[in-house]
Amino acid sequence: MATGSTRWPSAACSQPRCSAWWLRGSGATGAARGLLRPRALAVFSVGLLVAGLANGMVAIAAGRVLQGLGSGMLGVALYVGVGQIVPKPLHPRLFALFAAAWVVPGPVGPPIAALLVEWFGWRSVFLVVALIVPVAAALLLPSLRVSPEKQAPPRTHSALVWAALAAAGALLLNAAGSAASLAGTLAMGAAGALVALMAARPLLPRGSLAAAPGLPSVIALRGLLAAGFGTAEAFVPLYLNRAHDWSLAQAGVALSVGAVCWSAGSAVQARLKAERTRQRGLSAGLALVAAGTAIVTLPALLPVPAAVLVAGWAVAGFGIGLSFPMLSVLTLQLSPAEEQGRNASALQLADALTSSAALALAGALFAHGGGFVAVMAVAVALPSLAALLSRRLRPT
């Protein structure tokens, strides 16, 4: 199917983020070749070992860099594996299972990590995961070796340079939110945004920055949706802790409610069949994310209990479960087989760059007196814009 087509897939989907080096790993990967998957797992494992055996912060940072690079490479390979091995009618159900897989780590992961740190020290958090990677590899790699279709030529050295520049732009954006002065925030934010936009342009499908109809609008919607939801998710625990004296564990439970609802929304979305119903489901999901994040803001504006925030977060979680995975399915369907790797890379780049930019803006607003309401205004605006742009995905 041509990349610019606006035809919808015949069934539904779901799937549940973002260091600059994760961004580089996904951006530099144009095809999921057989050699890439073991290499991605190897890079990720080496990163875990470097961090777990580190004797200083520089070594820990180096380990995290390698982890991010390996994660980005593996993420693209998984998308291509889905596109080339799994029959198209099953894509929605598989992405729904991806979303469900995030529910268990969400509430269970932090307590396990805390126990590991208490019993064995902080290094165990990295080293235990490194021990699990070979098991995951043994389960995953045989399935991904099923004669994949030919992919487009791998990225050139110039594309690697653009990906590195995009990573540098993301780092500048992240640093802007913590600058000491407003002038420093504005300068670093503007520089980071300029570098990121310049670097992203040759790495994304033509028209993505303008949300042109077809695949470019899918890429744009993914970025807006991920950035809005991720911005709210980053500040909800902080607000509950500071304004309502919730412990971090209690605030974590609030986030877990969103994770469970994400999975529920994914399950509903996976059962939508008709093209028009799927279109409405995506638009409704985007609107629910915007409405849910608006409800999350109410305790900061009105004398209502914090439970209202949790209810709003549940609405937002259901909405992203309804909409986020559909964009993954659309990306694969609107991509010729030989371009699936590059377009999956573009999807994740959009996610990474917009999330970095939104979090930088939100951090600057919060640090310089805007408070929680200003942050949530950003979080509401992004999925609202995505809901408006979703009209460009209507089938012709």
Image: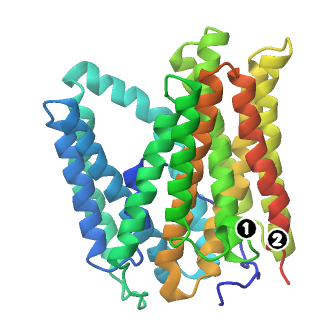
Residue at 27%, 54% (x, y): give it. 44
Quarter of the rendering occupied by the C terminus: bottom right
The residue wearing badge 2 is: 392
- Tell whether 2 sits left or right of 120: right
Residue 386 visible within the image: yes
Residue at 69%, 50% (x, y): give it. 320
Q: Of helix, strand and loop, which one carries label 2?
A: helix
Q: Which mark is residue 341?
A: none
Report which quarter residue 281 is drawn in.
bottom right
332 or 389: nearer the eye?
389
Residue 279: horizontal and vertical position, in percent? 82, 68
Residue at 48%, 83% (x, y): give it. 84
Q: Earlier in the sequence, mark 1 or mark 2?
A: 1
Quarter of the rendering occupied by the N terminus: bottom right
Residue 255 visible within the image: no
**Of labels 1 and 2, the one closer to you:** 1
Q: Of helix, strand and loop, which one carries label 1?
A: loop
On screen, 142 above or below 320?
A: below
Three-letter amino acid code at the position of disc 1 = Ala
The residue wearing badge 1 is: 211
Residue 297: horizontal and vertical position, in percent? 78, 26
On screen, 104 above or below 321?
A: above
